[in-house]
Image: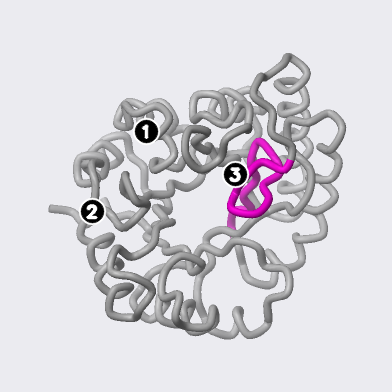
C-alpha cells in the first residue's frame, strides 16, 4: 500500500519564492500543503498544476471559544473560494486562534465544559459548510509544551475526542505526529486509534522539526502500522530541512521523507 505524500511549501526551499517552491515540490511528485493563502497569487498557484492537499481554513477566532467561534466560521466561508480554485481537499483549523510564531492570541491554560461544547458545535457547523462545498475541515492537534503554549484541548486525545463527537463525514483530524510526540508519545497506538477519523497526517522529526530520520521518531515503523490499519491517505511533511533553506538541502529532505514512507 502506498501513501499520497505532500510537502508543506512554507517550510522548505526558503530561499525560493513560494511559487517556485510549489513547482519544485510538484515536479518531484509530491502534493503541496499551504498555510495562509491570503495575499497570494491564487491563479498562479493553480496554474502550476500542483495538487494541493490542505491549506489553513480560518484566520480569526477560536473553535472552542464561545465568544469568537463565529469568527472561525465567517473566515472559513471567506476562504472557500480560494480552496475551490486550488482544488484543496482539506481546510485546517486549530483549537485556538494562532498569532505570531504560532502562539495563542489569547492564552488559556484550563479547559472548561463550555469549551468542549463550543468546539463540538463549531465543528458541526464547519461540517455543514464543508458538505455544501465538498471540502473537509480538519482539526489539528498541537503541542503546548514547546510550540503552542496556552491552547486548551490541543492534545491529540482531545482533538480526536472532539472529532469523534462531531461525527460528521466532512470533519476529520489533521493528525500531527510531531506535536503528538512532544506532548504525548505512544504514536503507533495513536495512529491506530485515530485511523477512522484521520483526514491527513503531518510529520516532522523530534527534536528540531526537520525531515524524518533526523531525530527520535521511528517513521518506518509508523508507516508499517499505518499500512496495517489500512490508511491510504495523505502524509504531509510539515518540516524544515536539516541542511537549511537551500535547494540542495530541500531536495535531500524530500528524498528522506519519501524513503521513510516507501514500501520496503
Residue position marked by numbered label 3 in the rendering? 138
Q: Earlier in the sequence, mark 1 or mark 3?
A: 3
Check if residue 96 falls in the magenta segment. yes
Give the spatial CA distance, label 2 vs label 3: 27 Å
Q: Residue at x 39, y 35 (%)?
A: 182
Residue 145 against residue 21 in the figure, above or below = above
Across and down, in percent, residue 150 comes to 62, 32
Residue 222 against residue 259 in the figure, above or below = above
Across and down, in percent, residue 205 comes to 31, 48
Foreground residue, 189 or 8? Answer: 8
Q: Nearer the viewer, mark 1 or mark 2?
A: 2
Left or right: residue 141 compared with residue 179: right
Q: Nearer the viewer, mark 2 or mark 3?
A: 2
Residue position marked by numbered label 2 in the rendering? 214
Q: Crowdedness of circle 1 by 10 Å Cα count: few (<14), some, many (20+)?
A: many
Q: Crowdedness of circle 3 by 10 Å Cα count: few (<14), some, many (20+)?
A: many
Residue position marked by numbered label 1 in the rendering? 191
Element assignment for label 1: helix
Q: Earlier in the sequence, mark 1 or mark 2?
A: 1
- State which region is magenta: 89-105
Element assignment for label 3: strand
Question: Which image quarter: residue 262?
Answer: bottom left
Q: Crowdedness of circle 2 by 10 Å Cα count: few (<14), some, many (20+)?
A: some
Residue 190 against residue 81 in the figure, above or below = above
Across and down, in percent, residue 129 comes to 77, 47
Left or right: residue 10 compared with residue 39: left
Amino acid at each position: 500500500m502506498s501513501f499520497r505524500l505532500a510537502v508543506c511549501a512554507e517550510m522548505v526551499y526558503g530561499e525560493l519564492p513560494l511559487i517556485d517552491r510549489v513547482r519544485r515540490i510538484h515536479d518531484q511528485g509530491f502534493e503541496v500543503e499551504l498555510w495562509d493563502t491570503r495575499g497570494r497569487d491564487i491563479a498562479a498557484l493553480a496554474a502550476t498544476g500542483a495538487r494541493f492537499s490542505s491549506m489553513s481554513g480560518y484566520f480569526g477566532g477560536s473553535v472552542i471559544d464561545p465568544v469568537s467561534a463565529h469568527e472561525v466560521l465567517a473566515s472559513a466561508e471567506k476562504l472557500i473560494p480560494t480552496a475551490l480554485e486550488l482544488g484543496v481537499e482539506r481546510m485546517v483549523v486549530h483549537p485556538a486562534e494562532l498569532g505570531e510564531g504560532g502562539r495563542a492570541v489569547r492564552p488559556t491554560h484550563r479547559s472548561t465544559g463550555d469549551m468542549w461544547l463550543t468546539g463540538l458545535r463549531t465543528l458541526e457547523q464547519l461540517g455543514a459548510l464543508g458538505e455544501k462545498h465538498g471540502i473537509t475541515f480538519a482539526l489539528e492537534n498541537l503541542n503546548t509544551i514547546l510550540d503552542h503554549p496556552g491552547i486548551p484541548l490541543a492534545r491529540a486525545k482531545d482533538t480526536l475526542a472532539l472529532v469523534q463527537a462531531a461525527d460528521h463525514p466532512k470533519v476529520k483530524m489533521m493528525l500531527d505526529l510531531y506535536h503528538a510526540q512532544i506532548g504525548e508519545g505512544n504514536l503507533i497506538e495513536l495512529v491506530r486509534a485515530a485511523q477512522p477519523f484521520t483526514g491527513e497526517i503531518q510529520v516532522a522529526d523530534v527534536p528540531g522539526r526537520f525531515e524524518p530520520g533526523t531525530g527520535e521518531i521511528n517513521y518506518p515503523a509508523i508507516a508499517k502500522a499505518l499500512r496495517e490499519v489500512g490508511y491510504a491517505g495523505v502524509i504531509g511533511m510539515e518540516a524544515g530541512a536539516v541542511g537549511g533553506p537551500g535547494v540542495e538541502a530541500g531536495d535531500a529532505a524530500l528524498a528522506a521523507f519519501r524513503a521513510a514512507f516507501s514500501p520496503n
